[in-house]
Amino acid sequence: MADIKPPQPDPTWSPETLLVHGGTLRSQFGEISEAMFLTQSFVYQTAEQAEARFKDEDPGFIYSRFSNPTVAMFEERMRLLEGAEAARATATGMAAITAALLSYLKAGDHIVAARAMFGSCLYVVQDLCPRFGISYTLVDGRETEAWANAVKPNTKAFFFETPANPTLDLVDIAAVSKIAHDAGALVFVDNVFATPILQKPLEHGADVVMYSATKHIDGQGRCLGGVVLGSEKYLKDHLHNFLRQTGPAMSPFNAWVMLKGLETLPLRVRAQCDSASKVASHLAGRAGVAKVLYAELPNFPQKALAKQQMLGPGQMVTFVIEGGKPAAFRFLNALKLIKISNNLGDAKSLITHPATTTHQRLKPEDRLGLGITDGMLRLSVGLEAASDLLADIDRGLAAATAG
Ligand SMILES: *Cc1c(COP(=O)(O)O)cnc(C)c1O
């Protein structure tokens, strides 16, 4: 009789295989597609079983704020993909980042973070942490020396994104992790822009990796979600209890959407990268384009580092239109296919003007300090045919240069 149990992950499996089969829990009905367990809590066969479960002596589920079978499948599939000891899902990417940092840090600690960061992450570091007695230093993440110079006796965490939003600046994960570890600090990496397909921060020395699953992991613009990955020890000593008691849990419905998203993640990321590469070379050197930032282009300042720690240049292309904001806006308003949106990692190509949206709240001098000029546009390349995207970009360029 054939066993209906899902196949156990084999250490020789490639990511593509892990993402289709890894972490599957199959019910007595033998369903092929992962089941969605929309339940808040669980029943026990006996009082003794309930007692044992609360004592952690029986491995079942208790309450979906703690864990849920569909969420557990998503966590295990992510864990296998990332090659981490442990993974926990959260309601959003920001819940993942906030929980990862605040479960670990305490009053009197110091955090060093890269200045070029997702806006809400900056809020956590600059506004939230100090309210609880956690001080911070912001550095230019590209300068490895700057990380070393920012270390204090009470430094407990390094935190950065690489590539960073929207300039695609890179942080040398291995070099910076070494500095952190010499100082006794943990390294937290927001790996959203790279995706788990193109970059494995843990292999380069990072300790904790966070994702907004809202982006490429869903990849089709439906649900919010997040995930934190790290060592068993970090999870047990810090994250586990924080998540259980404060409750930023991922909904089983969202976990199910994310699980199905993971099945196609490598295919989607590869297709998007192929198109992004075509878009970047199409834009480079065109009249009306002052600059194109894409790790594959010959003039990308951190090309060697990209090769060292990434498996590909990614699906985000940032470029600067000559003529500042008016020209950038003419470009955006002429587009027929690419959508104006601040989101990224979607099947649909999305473009944003960081200076007036995602980075609008920054002081103009701080924005310029990050290299975000008024003509800068950030394009998240989707799954449309590259030829249609190039035609749309030409429409944008014609409008931008006509002004
Ligand atoms: C979107 C994003 C986040 C936040 O994720 P949410 O799911 O929106 O909470 C954090 N970091 C980066 C780099 C992001 O792009």
Image (cartoon, rainbow, N blue to C red):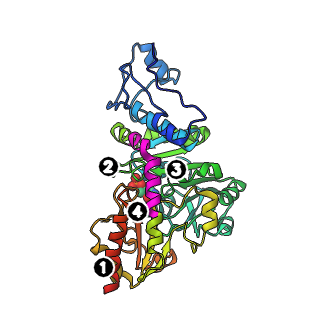
CA distance separating discs 3 and 2:
20 Å
Q: Which residues are magenta?
A: 258-276
Whichever of callouts 3 and 4 sits on the residue coming sooner in the sequence is 3
Side of 173 relative to 289 (left or right): right
Secondary structure under tag 1 reads: helix
Quick one: label 3, few (<14), some, or many (20+) residues within 10 Å? many
Viewport quadrant of the C terminus: bottom left
Tell me if 155 is positioned left or right of 62 in this view: right
CB under 8 Å between callouts 2 and 1?
no
Mark 2 sits on what residue?
222
Asked if the beta carbon under badge 2 is closer than 8 A to the nearest atom of ligand 1, the reply is no
Q: Is residue 137 visible?
A: yes
Give the percent coordinates (x, y) of residue 138. 56, 67
Q: CA distance from mark 2 to mark 1?
A: 29 Å
Cα separation, mark 2 vs mark 4, equals: 16 Å
Q: Callout 3: helix, strand or loop? A: helix
Circle 3 residue: 197
N-term mark: 2 or 1: 2
Q: Position of residue 28 (x, y in %)?
A: 38, 19
**Observer able to see residue 241:** no
Q: Which mark is residue 330?
A: 1
- Dot 2 lies on which element? loop
Ligand 1 image-quadrant field: bottom left
Which quadrant, please, contains the N terminus?
top left
Judging by the rendered image, the residue that carries numbered circle 4 is 380
Q: Give the residue type that dot 1 points to.
A: Arg
**Sequence-wise, which precedes: disc 2 or disc 4?**
2
Q: Amino acid at mark 2?
A: Arg
